[in-house]
Amino acid sequence: MDQQKVLALFDERMRRNAQPDDPAVRIERTGDVVRQVGASADDWNGVLWSGLDEATADAAIAAQVAHFTSLGREFEWKLYTHDLPADLSGRLLAAGFSTEPAETLMVAEIEAITADAELPDGVRLQPVVDASGVELAVAVHEQAFETGADHLRHRLLSQLGGRPETFSMAVAMAGDVPVCAARMELHPGTGFASLWGGGTVPAWRGRGIYRALVAHRARIAAESGCRYLQVDASSQSRPILQRLGFTALSTTVPHVFRP
């Protein structure tokens, strides 16, 4: 993989020319900033891309703070370490943002992924196609990440109801118990599909279920004509994804502003 070329494609297609990830949101381009504005505070609100320099950064930051504050919204500035200016993070912190844990931007060419779809005995994959499936996925998320999932529930229900053709999610079931869940979003015309939310409940980790869900989603993405899979990987999933053929291209650090 030509890492610089693929990173440039990602920036251009997935960030600068981003598509709404949900029917309830809209993409706005204002100056050198691309942002997503949701219909409510339950949607993801934030800055996806910026083309700033030392002379324009502070004014652009202030404009975004003013815009989202006028809506009463918390928002995220999706900052990547290769974004300019080099001190953009420091400028955001000075403006009142706080950081959340860093994630690694990882990309793989689908044909090079080495994952297999073999599941442990007694475990099967169940597609998420309705509200009951969403509740299974939410149950996994709460156990795997030890956090609430109200925003996730809202997002999944909205995507299923609005653009199901660009959304795929599966839950790994051990009998009647959900033990792993992961979703994928397709981005028509970009060549990319993005993987999100892969998590396994503690008692079922280390048995290859996460690998199988990567393989499952890679197959669907390939059938949909995608060339690349993209993940914002946590420290836990990064080594697994590296073994499956993913390459680290950058680091993303969420900067969040709370009015």
Image: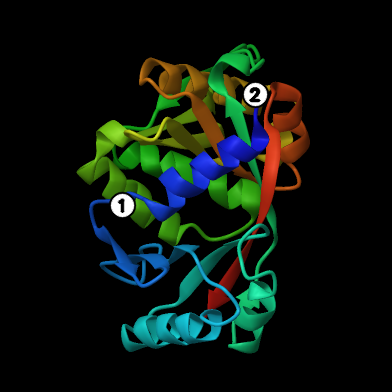
Choose top left, top right, bottom left or bottom right for residue 254: bottom right
Which image quadrant: the N terminus?
Answer: top right
- Residue in the image at 49% along x and 65% along y: 51
- Residue in the image at 63% along x and 18% along y: 113
Q: Position of residue 233 (x, y in %)?
A: 65, 44
Which is nearer the eye, 108 or 22? 108
Which is nearer the eye, 117 or 255? 255
Point out which mark residue 238 bears. Answer: none
Q: Dot 2 surroundings within 10 Å: few (below 14), some, or many (20 or more)?
A: many
From mark 1 to mark 2, how far is it between C-alphas?
Answer: 28 Å
Which is nearer the eye, 40 or 63? 63
Q: Kindly identify which residue carries mark 1.
A: 20
Mark 2 residue element: helix
Residue 126 placement, left or right of 28: right
Mark 1 residue element: loop
- Residue in the image at 46% along x and 80% along y: 60
Amino acid at the residue labelled 1: Pro
Q: Position of residue 45 (x, y in %)?
A: 40, 67
Q: Kindly identify which residue carries mark 2.
A: 211
Would residue 176 be seen by someone viewing this image from the given angle?
Answer: no
Numbered circles on residues, count = 2
Q: Is residue 233 above or below residue 186?
A: below
Q: Dot 1 surroundings within 10 Å: few (below 14), some, or many (20 or more)?
A: some
Residue 188 placement, left or right of 232: left
Q: Position of residue 140 (x, y in %)?
A: 55, 43
Residue 212 placement, left or right of 9: right
Q: Which of the two labelled residues, at mark 1 and mark 2, occupies the earlier sequence position?
A: 1
Q: Is residue 37 above or below residue 133?
A: below
Which color scheme did the rendering employ for the protein? rainbow
